[in-house]
Image: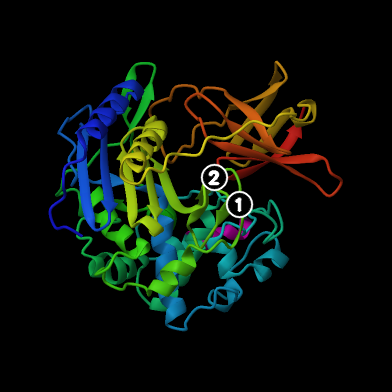
Amino acid sequence: MNATPLPLPPHIAAFAEAELARLQVPGLAVGVLHEGRVYAGGFGVTSIENPLPVTAETLFQIGSTSKTFTATALMQLVEDGAVDLDAPVRKYLPEFRLQSEPDAAAVTVRHLVTHHAGWVGDYFRDTGRGDDAIERIVAKMANSPQLTPVGHTFSYSNAAFYVAGHIVQTLRGLPFETVIRERIFGPLGMDRSFYFPEEAIPYRVAAGHIVTEDGPQVATPWNVPRSIAPGGGVISNVLDQLRYAALHVGEPGTPEVISAQSAAAMQVPQAEAGSMCESIGISWMLDDFGGTPFVKHGGATNGHLSSFELVPSRRFAVTVLTNSDTGRAARNTVAEACREHFISLPDPSPVAMANPPAVDEFVGAYEAVLARLEVTAAGGALVVRDVTPERGFAERRHRPLPSTPAHLAFTAPDRTAVLDGERKGERAEFLRDAGGEVAWMRWDGRIARRVGD
C-alpha cells in the first residue's frame, strides 16, 4: 500500500458532495484500496454543532463491521488450535445459558459467527464499564427467548457476537479490547482505531446525527455500551479501515495477522442467508456479482452509517463512513460509484418475476422483539412499512423522520426486492412453516414472526 493516500477522482468527489446535500448527511469519508494504491477523501463536517471539515483521518463509529474483527480474533484462536468452530459454545463457556436448554447445549461457535444461533439477536444492555461488561451481558442471555432452533435459518444477531467476543477474552485471559488492540490493530498499524471514547477524543471525531423534521440533530449519547463491543464497538477512520481491508483482500506485504488460508476460509459460504446477502461466511456477508465474489459488511449505530466492501479477486476494497442515519443510501451509492470507476463492477439490478404470485397470503403484521413491520397490498404489489419503535440505546433525544414505505417486487417465489426509492436494491424474503404457511418475514437480515393479517 502507498504510504500517502491519493485524492479520489474528481467526479467521485463531486458525487459524494451531491449525495451529502441530497440526503442531509453532514459528513462523509471515503477510502479505496486498488492494486496496492490508496485513495481517500473527506467531505462535509464532523458535527452541525461544532463543524470541522471531515478528512480521511476523521474518526467515525463503524458499527457492525466490528463483528469481522471479532471473527478474525476467533480465527487466530482456530490457528492456535485453541478453538474448534464446530465445538459447542459450552466447551469454552461452560456456564452459558439460554431460555432454551437444548439450544444452549447445541449452539456451536460456527453458529455464532454465521448468524444461525436462533435466539433474539437485537439485544442491547449497558452492563457498565468494567472488564466484566461482556461477561455480564452474556450471562443475561439466560433470559433470551429462542426464535428458531439453533442452525435453522439466518437471522442477523448482534447478541451472538457478544458470546463470540466473550470466548475470545476468556481464552486469551485479557479484556476483549486489549486482545483486538494487541493482535489486530497493532500489527496492522491501525493506530487510529479504538473502542473507548476517551481514546478517540484527542483526534478529530465525527458526531452522529439523526435527521428530523427540523434537519440533522446531533445524536446522543455518543458512545455505545462496552458490553456490545464485539458486535459494534470499533471507532476508526477510512485509512485504518483500508489497512484492515488489505489483510482480507490478500494485499502483498500486509502483516500476517491471520494466514492467507484463514482469511480465505472466512470468505467461503457457510450457509444460505437472505435479505442482507446471498450467503454468509465467517462473519462476512457474501454475494456474487456476475461471477465475481463480493465480500461485505456494514454498520449502523448512534447516527453513524457505514459500508465496507471487498473484491479480493481484483485487489479492491472501498469503505464509506457517514455521520447520519440517512447515510444508509449515501454509503451505498458512493461505494457503487467507486466500484464502477476502479473495477467496472456496479450493483446488479434485481429483476422482477414475469408472473409473480398473488400477494394476499403475504399481507400482515410481522414482529420481532424490537421490530414491527406492516405489509399491505397496493395495486397487486406489496408495500412494507417499518413501524419499529425507536431503539432507546441509540438515540434518546431526537425523533427521526418516518421511514418511507418500500415497494416490494417478487424476484422469485417468496423472494422480493425494492426496485426504486431510497432502499433500492434491498431484499426481503418470506419464510414458511412446516405446513407451507407464510410464518416469517426476513427484512434487514432479521426474521420477524407473522402475527396478523
- The secondary element bearing badge 1 is classed as loop
Q: Which residue is mark 2?
A: 276
Asked whether the viewer can see residue 314, the reply is yes
Q: Is residue 10 above or below residue 178?
A: above
Name the residue: 62% across, 66% down.
97
Q: Are marks 1 and 2 in contact (CB under 8 Å)?
A: yes
Does the segment drawn in magenta span residue 179?
A: no
Magenta stretch: give its range. Answer: 137-143
Q: CA gap, disc 1 to disc 2? A: 7 Å
Of 81 and 120, which appears nearest the observer?
A: 81
Name the residue: 80% across, 30% down.
361
Q: Which residue is mark 1?
A: 273
Q: Is residue 16 above or below residue 3?
A: above
Q: Residue furthest right?
A: 435
- Residue 331: name its quadrant: top left
Does the segment drawn in magenta span residue 142?
A: yes
Of 96 and 257, which appears nearest the observer?
A: 257
- Residue 10: name its quadrant: top left
- Residue 244: name its quadrant: bottom left
Left or right of 112: which side holds 63? left
